[in-house]
Image (tube, coloured by chain):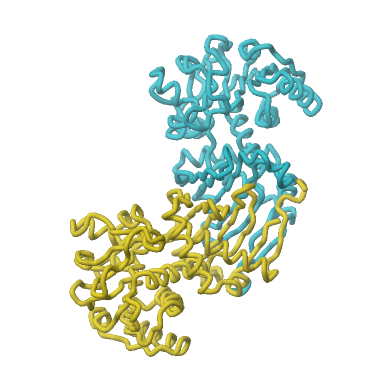
Chain colours: A cyan, B yellow
Amino acid sequence: MTLLLTKEDVRDLIEMPAVIEAVEAAFRAYSSDEVDQPSYMGIHLSTEGAEIDFKAGYHRSGELVSLKASSGGFRDNLARFGLPNGMGTVLLFDGQSGALTCVMDGSLLTGFRTGAAGAVSVRALARPDARRLAAIGTGNQARMQIRAIREVMQIDAIHAWGRSHAGAEAFATEIEATFGIPVTVEASAELAVAQADVVVTTTRASGVALRAGCLRPGTHVVAIGADQPGKQELDPELFRDARIVVDAAVQCAEKGELQHALKAGIVDGAHAEIGEVLLGRKPGRESVEQITLFDSTGMAIQDNTTAAAILRRARERGIGQPFDFLTQDR
Amino acid sequence: MTLLLTKEDVRDLIEMPAVIEAVEAAFRAYSSDEVDQPSYMGIHLSTEGAEIDFKAGYHRSGELVSLKASSGGFRDNLARFGLPNGMGTVLLFDGQSGALTCVMDGSLLTGFRTGAAGAVSVRALARPDARRLAAIGTGNQARMQIRAIREVMQIDAIHAWGRSHAGAEAFATEIEATFGIPVTVEASAELAVAQADVVVTTTRASGVALRAGCLRPGTHVVAIGADQPGKQELDPELFRDARIVVDAAVQCAEKGELQHALKAGIVDGAHAEIGEVLLGRKPGRESVEQITLFDSTGMAIQDNTTAAAILRRARERGIGQPFDFLTQDR
């Protein structure tokens, strides 16, 4: 039997602390040769800017194969069809039989697992006494980062900057109301980070949103926005003296923030993958003064372990509709 | 709403004549720049020989994106889980919105669309007076080829050869009972093809199953078995004087029967893609004496148009269970 989970089911089942543990497990698995993630398939649709991507991941010890289909960029969806401009579907297959175990709506999963990645990096790399956060970019993923990071760090204050001042104000109002954390909207990214111990960049920009030279010693930077060739948020100079930790070395060199520091010849690679740090194979932060930088591009194995956690919880709580695609064969 | 179709639904809905038209449309679309098919993703599982593959295809004018997940090689499935050793799932997404339109069991689809490809090639390339067929290989796909080819050609007699004599006898009994076509089991592949106008090879061998020099002039060969690097059924010498038509030039050069003729330096490529022949852009058969050879490796766009035909028919007949993965958003 295949379990079907709607977006509403997933909303009920997905919980940030469990996703953080799932994503940490994903990073550990990736650095333990427990993972197979083939190159993703991407298709550009006739609608300008619209695409559908497929990412598959296999977690050997978890014995699950995941396939996530993500659509995005369908700007007229709401007006034309009453649908969001991007949706997602996740399939889980039993690694022992190849059977389709679960079909779940995947619209919420990517945001959660990306937020969780930031939190895992904060737990592993930020100073233990970090209390102040700068949010460069104030969209949905900025909200998700805070939702995740507050699970692993006591956030006393947030300094926010976004290209749209109105957007930043809305972000401030929402974060204060939701989490009771005071948010100050700053006039520049540099002013925001100058008051922070942890900096989260989520602008999805294609140019420098944050100049070098304004970070405080000991800051941890969570670089989320760059996940495609050409995308950029950080001045490559930021990499020069930082401890550079990535989710996946090959992927970050190609499409993460790291691509620009490599091209500029400032560094010749990352110091470690986050999984290696979590497993104790390589050092993370080496001093309280060191700037640490986590470059997150997103991996299929994060989808895999996150979806697996949702499926486990659905089974525990008896949520979802079982459906038998193979009736006649039983 | 997403329409869910079980294996039993698909069995009721799938009809060979419609699949033949769907596959012909797929070939035409592929040669009309109407198709995007990214390189497939394949994952090898811990179970030896077991794998799951994902193939995606976009049919621009059809405005559908398909994703087929195929598992195979789970040899202990029946004993351990009461499941077949390979299964399939097909997702269809609306190209205009990215919405998940359909989830259907895909176990039957690959066999049908592969059979249909053979039939399309026979209709396009075999002599109009062809009546006798040789089946080299007598497994499931051989049955499917006959099921398809008899829709486009009057088959008066079948000469069959398979590595297992018992398998060939079972094939003969079944084909005679199902289609009323007399089948003679031959002692060798060469004896079988010497009496045929159309030859279908489905052995999935990794060596020469059919030597050169034994085909009659004017024969059409449907080469199905080679769809991976290393797989081979035909003596590469068969290519020397044949009119070579492929489903996809790049793919056949890499993993079709053509790979071996290229490596041996016998030819430097195919003469045409089948879509180009169907569109009248390149000649197919050039004389009654010419040997024509169709190299079939299988394309995602065949899955796409076949699944689309199944979905259309399901809607016409009101079959399948609608399921709303996005309830809360409506």
Which residue is found at the position 50% from the left and 44% from the top? A42
Residue B147 placement, left or right of B234: right
Q: Where, quadrant-wise, is the N terminus of chain A in this rendering?
A: bottom right
Image location of residue B12, percent across then percent down: 61, 75
Q: Nearer the viewer, residue A322 or B297?
A: B297
Residue A294 placement, left or right of A195: left
Which residue is found at the position 51% from the left and 47% from the top? A57
Give the mark count: 0
Q: Nearer the viewer, residue B211 or B222?
A: B222
- Position above or below: A116 against B127: above
- Position above or below: A83 against B323: above
Image location of residue A79, percent across then percent down: 73, 42
Q: Dividing the picture into quarters, in which one does residue B171 lie? A: bottom left
Image location of residue A162, percent across then percent down: 66, 20
Q: Is residue A308 visible?
A: no
- Position above or below: B248 against A206: below
Q: Residue furthest front?
A: B280
Q: Where, quadrant-wise, is the C terminus of chain A in this rendering?
A: bottom right
Q: Nearer the viewer, residue B37 or B43?
A: B37
Image location of residue A259, percent across then percent down: 44, 26
